[in-house]
Image: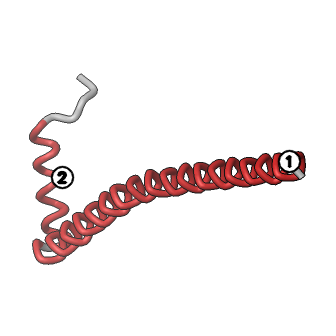
């Protein structure tokens, strides 16, 4: 009842083609397709970067823990050396 029928959609499409022309509509469609492709590429490029950043942060945390352990080991060794003297 209140919906748009296929005939109404065809008439609207015909009016749009007559107003803008096929060349201009083709250009608009190409521009829209390029924009969507660029958006998808930006989204897919952003996800690995976020994962890569998380990996780098985890590696930095691991390196800091390892450095702290080494410093603690050195402190223990120097304390043992002092006790032996």
- In the structure shown, which secondary structural element does the residue marked by tag 1 occupy? helix
Report the Cα–Cα distance between label 1 and label 2: 95 Å
Q: Kindly indicate the quadrant of the structure image that contains residue 2.
A: top left
Mark nearest the camera among 1 and 2 is 1
9 lies left or right of 65: left
Q: Kindly indicate the quadrant of the structure image that contains residue 8.
A: top left
78 lies left or right of 4: right
Q: Residue 45: which disc?
A: none
Which residue: 53% across, 53% down? 59
Neighbor class of circle 2 (other Cα within 10 Å; few <14, some 14-19, many 20+) is few
Neighbor class of circle 1 (other Cα within 10 Å; few <14, some 14-19, many 20+) is few
- x and y percent of residue 39 in the render? 34, 61
Going from N to C along the chain, the mark reached first, 1 or 2, is 2
Residue at which label 1 appears: 84
Is 75 located above or below residue 28 in the figure?
above
Number of numbered tags placed on the structure image:
2
Is 57 located above or below residue 5 in the figure?
below
Residue at which label 2 appears: 12
Which residue: 76% across, 50% down? 77
- x and y percent of residue 3 in the render? 24, 29
Nearer the observer, 38 or 49: 49
């Amino acid at each position: 009842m209140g919906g748009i029928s296929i005939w109404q959609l065809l008439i609207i499409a015909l009016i749009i083609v007559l107003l803008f022309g096929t060349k201009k509509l083709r250009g608009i469609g190409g521009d829209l397709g390029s924009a969507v492709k660029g958006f998808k590429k930006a989204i897919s490029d952003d996800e690995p970067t976020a994962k890569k950043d998380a990996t780098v942060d985890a590696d930095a945390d691991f390196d800091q823990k390892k450095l702290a352990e080494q410093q603690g080991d050195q402190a223990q060794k120097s304390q043992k050396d002092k006790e032996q003297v």
